[in-house]
Every structure is written in C-alpha cells, then in structure tokens.
Amino acid sequence: MPVKPEIEARFEELKNIRQYLHTCPEVGLETVQTVAFVKKQLDALGIGYEDIGVNSLLAKIEGKGKGKTVAFRCDMDALQTTEETGLPYQSVVEGCMHGCGHDGHTTTMLAFAGYLANHRDFNGTVLLLFQSGEEGYGGALEVINDGLFEKYSIDYMFGMHNWPPYGEHQVIVHKGTAMASEDRFDLILRGKSGHASVPHGCIEPFAAVADFIKGAQSVIARKVSAHDKAVISITQVHGGSAYNIIPDEVVIKGNVRTTDPKVQDVIEESLGHLVAGLETIYGVTATFTYHRKHPPVINTTPELVIAAAERVVGKENVLTEELPAMGSEDYAFYMQKTRGCFVWIGNGSDSPLLHNSKYDFNDNVTVLGASLFAELLDEALSD
Ligand SMILES: [Zn+2]
Ligand SMILES: [Zn+2]
C-alpha cells in the first residue's frame, strides 16, 4: 500500500506521540496542555503558528509560489467518561478519556506537518488547524468567530475522522452529506394546577404532552419525504410532584437529526404548528424553543478525496456509497464557509465503537491519514 515511506518511517515516534496524548486527555475548550505540546512539536519542525478561537491553533506553511490556500483540520478534545481499556497508556485523568480518537487525529496532523516541513516545494499555502471543543463545545464556531475566513481566503478545507468498525485500510468518502445535523428543542407546557379528581376544573397539561410526543413522530411519517432521513427523539419529560395534584407545568426536551437543511426547516415549522395546535385544543400556554446546534456535514469536493485515496489505498478500498452517520460534527460549520470534504478512515473491523469506554485509536491510521492528506494537497493544488 503506497503510504508515504517517510511518514511510515516515523511510525514508532508517531505512536509514542499518540499514546502520550492518550494519557493526558483534555475536555472541551480546555485543551491547554495539548496545544502546548503541539506548539513544541511545530517549533521542532520550524513551522509557524498562531492561536485562534479558544485554545485552538493554526499552523501555516507557505509553499514556493503563490497558489491556492488549502486548510486541514483536526480536533484535539476528549470525552468526559471513564476509560476501561486497561492499556499501559490509559488516561491518567479521572473521568476523562480520548474515546473518539482525537489524540490520533492530532498525531495524524503532526505527521502531516512533519512531511510538509520537508516538502515546501508546493505552489500555495497550507493551513493546519488544531481545533478544541469539537464534542459539543462550539470549538469550530469559536475559530470562525475569531476570523479564520476573514484572515485567510481558504479555497479548500479537509478533515478526517477515524471510523470503526470499517477496516483499517478502508477510506470512506460521502458524495454529499457525510454526517447529520443536530437540533435541540425545549417545550414548556403551562396549564392550571388543581386536584386530580377535577381535571375539568384545571388546565391539565399531560394530555397535551402525550399528543406532542405522538405528533412529533407523525411529523417524520407525514411531513418528511420518504426519500429523506430524519429522527426526532424525545429525551426528557419533567412534570408533577404528587399522586393527587395536576401540575401546572411540564417540560419536554428533545433532539432532531436530519441529513438535509431543507428537512430541518420542515421539522422546525411542523413542530411549531403542532405546539400551536396543543394551545388551541387544550388551552395550555406553550413556550417552544428550537435551537439548531450543528448543520449537516455536506461534502462539496468528494472527487478530490476519492482520487487521492485511490492512490493511497487502491480503488477497491475507497467506499463511496456508504450511508451518512446520524451523529453530528462541528466541521459542518467550515463547509458553510468554503469547499471541501470530511473523510472517514477505518479504525479496524474489531475496534470498539467511538465513545465506547474500551475504544482506542488505531495507530496505523496516523500514517495512512497523513499520507492521504499529502496526496490530497497535490490534488487540491492542481484542481
Ligand atoms: Zn466524538
Ligand atoms: Zn470525534
């Protein structure tokens, strides 16, 4: 398999870096020590960088001539969960583990940085973004709000994620949506409390709650096209305090996933109509808040990654017809600002799934990922 021999030659060193990062995970936007470590590695490579967002870092490598600007992004943050791998390099931070492989993504980017440090003969500029706070902490938005796209005219941006249980030489490229959007909603239904024996003298909120829960599923069945994908899950219902008291307030919270922004519009609007109907039928007063947390990840240049990946792992190992994941990724925000693609690399068919307490990043992915990025740079600069 034609990974870059000089990246492969660093395998043991890269493995040590990755396993070191694994021992000291940091959560959310608090990637202070990780950034300090990355800075030291970049210093050793003679690569300049600047702080951006909140504890994110942007490295810059200028090629020999003026050309396109191509950005690559990795995430660095870990999960608030207790590791149960029993590995010699298991996390030493209580209740915190690299359970999504961002230790490996950071190392992959450092491997790519090392390669670029010795190959500055390209026409253009490469930006390497080491991002904090991917796991729901708004790290990408912090980077964008700090002016990434105002400061740099970025022609393409690419990102990768390891993906169990795909095989370790498999590369997965989605032509279009790779990962779903995530929206969250809060609904407060207010009625009038009273004795359980006289619901007709109260404004009883639970009938409205029941209709909302059923009605939300009807939105999927009746308002979303059979060709589209969407999930609405009710994840919290809070209300009441006694057997014999009708409460005056019930709170419902939920989560919505789709693969198409147009479906997000349909669902938000339909849930709004449903809530308005409950007010009319039951006389409750409703406060409905719908928050769009992440847009879907929509790849606009899959062909560049497919061409690059075929050179690294061979055509037979590049999968382009896989279903998108219904999980979300804040890389989606970058794809609203520039063209690019988010690629998955198999973490091994026997790997526990992401966010599992026994999960571990496959170190071979580092060499493959960095080689893929190197090929992808050639592809993007010659496009
Ligand atoms: Zn994750
Ligand atoms: Zn992740």
Image (cartoon, rainbow, N blue to C red):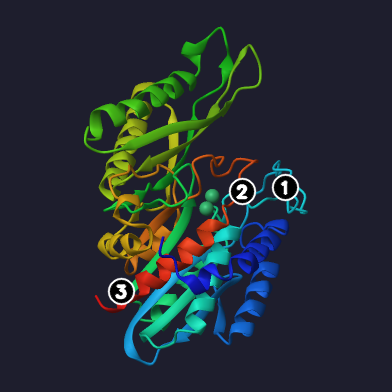
> Which disc number belongs to residue 360?
2
Give how far across and how far down residue 366 sits, in percent: 53, 62
Q: What residue is at 42 percent from the left and 25 percent from the top?
A: 213
Q: Mark 2: few, some, or many residues within 10 Å (few <14, many ≥20)?
A: many
Q: Is mark 2 within 8 Å of ligand 2?
A: no
Residue type marked 3: Ala
Gap between marks 1 and 3, in whole Å? 39 Å
Gap between marks 2 and 1, in whole Å? 9 Å
Q: What residue is at 34 percent from the left and 33 percent from the top?
A: 276
Q: Mark 1 or 3 closer to N-term? A: 1
In the rendered image of this protein, does residue 262 appear above or below residue 374? above
> Which disc number belongs to residue 380?
3
Residue type marked 2: Asp
Q: Quadrant of the N terminus?
A: bottom left
Q: Mark 2 or 3 closer to N-term? A: 2
* SS assignment at label 2: loop
In the picture of the structure, the residue carrying the numbered disc 1 is: 87
Gap between marks 2 and 3, in whole Å? 31 Å
Q: What residue is at 43 percent from the left and 20 percent from the top?
A: 210
Circle 2/circle 1 CB separation < 8 Å: yes
Residue 129 visible in the current orientation: no
